[in-house]
Image: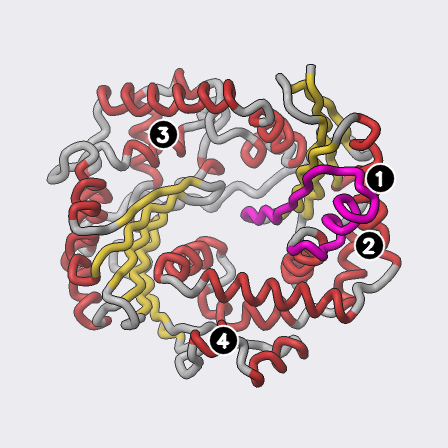
Amino acid sequence: MVNKAGALVSLALILLGGPGLAAQDEAGAPESLPFSFETYMLRNGLRIILSEDPRLPLVTVAVGYGAGTLREKPGQEGLAFLLENLMFQGSENVPPLQHVAYVQKVGGELNATTSADKALFYETLPSNQLSLALWLESDRMKSLAITPLAIEQTRDDLLREHRERVATDPYFETFIQFEELLFPDPSYGHPMIGPGMDDLSEAEILAFHRAHYVPNNAVLCIVGNIDVARTRGLVARYFESIAPGPDVPPLPGPEFTRESDAVVRSAQVSGGSAGFHMGFRFFPLQPGDRECLRILAYVLFEGETSRLKHRLLRRDLTARYVTGSLDERPGVSALKIFCFATNAIMVARSERAILSEIDRLKANEVSPDELRRARRRFRKDYLDRLATNLGKARFLVEAAFAGTGLDALDRDLGTVLAVTPQNLAAFASKYFVPQNRVVLEFGPR
């Protein structure tokens, strides 16, 4: 399949906000992606995404595996994160940690991350070094070396870093507790590193790798100054001979069970300020809900004039700091709020102020001016993310794992910008209910 979305649209014009595009934004009319891409699949099941951008002599190679934390079984919390780090411990033709050295030697940068649904590895380097990146990624896809020594050293490093984080950040454990409250499903709410990580056996680690780090459970995305025909040949040369693994079952669907009323818990921290986490979980989402949620996050959190920052930090003066984020996971989304206040009294006032603003969303439609600001900020952030090779590569890999279909990406931005005040009010009335809300308050011991 070849997606020619936005092939005639200049990225520079979009970012500058030309008159025609500004008018589209105001009306919420559909907009195309500011770049084109094509996608196909190798015989071993590896999905390939290619996007040519000749503006700079750089290329980004990103490989995502469906090997996130949702694939862990009870008692295996931390296994996915451990495997992410073991991917740098050498393969048949690459000594331990030399993957990093090879990329940095040619002036490149690289990193990796693990989320609920995937482990993602990526490097950006000069485009004449594309073969190097593909060789490195294919070698560890085909022949990763998981030795007892590598397991021991990697696990010890991760556990030491985790202990240091717990010791130096008084709020770190409140985030873990909050996740467990907000997602009361062991698969969705467990921490990245769990208490059982030290007990993971070599057999469990090898089995997880064999089951999930296989071509038919992976996406390879290449973005940058490439010749598409030549790149197809290089991909075939390095990846087509890798044998597929067993069929990978679909991700488990969330099953949330909790009391029928709002959950409020408290935690003590070793110093610091009083404050709280507040979260709203949205499940199951219906068509159109995701778009409403993404705009609502901007209405509530983003920008100094957003509702919660204006109310808590400027009008009521009940909080010293407040931030929020939208957490989108397979099958479920959540809005998360984190707030510092002076004392327990101000914590309670800040919580009431937030709930008051939520109720206003249900009773009064978002004003045209407020919606216009939210649309503009969302559109700018959306397009800013796509202004780099790495941003585009991560965007495409995430879309491939989201299950919505890459052919729908050309409509993604436009559908969000088309959300109306009536849509937002209906969404708020449906989902902002007590049984979807959790609060974790914290304060000094």
Mark with earlier residue (4, 2):
4
Q: Which mark is residue 14?
A: 4
Mark with earlier residue (1, 4):
4
From the image, tell me which residue sits under label 1. 352
Q: Residues within 10 Å of mark 3 (few under 14, many from 20)?
A: many
> Callout 4: helix, strand or loop?
helix
Looking at the rendered image, the disc whose residue lies closer to the viewer, 1 or 3, is: 1
Q: On the picture, is 412 further left or further right than 355?
A: left
Amino acid under disc 1: Arg
Asked where in the image residue 442 lies, by quadrant, the reply is top right
* Quarter of the rendering occupied by the N terminus: bottom left
Q: Is residue 414 visible?
A: yes
From the image, tell me which residue sits under label 2. 429
* Quarter of the rendering occupied by the C terminus: top right
Q: Residue 318 colored magenta? A: yes
> Callout 2: helix, strand or loop?
helix
> Callout 1: helix, strand or loop?
helix
From the image, tell me which residue sits under label 3. 82
Q: On the picture, is 171 further left or further right than 60?
A: right
Give x and y (percent) for residue 216. 32, 50
Mark with earlier residue (3, 4):
4
Q: Is residue 46 visible?
A: no
Give the CA distance from mark 1 to mark 4.
40 Å
Please tell me which residue is depicted at 77% across the width and 31% down the height of the picture. 263
Amino acid under disc 2: Ser
Give the CA distance from mark 3 to mark 2.
42 Å
Mark with earlier residue (1, 3):
3
The residue range painted magenta reads 303-330
Give the CA distance from mark 1 to mark 3.
41 Å
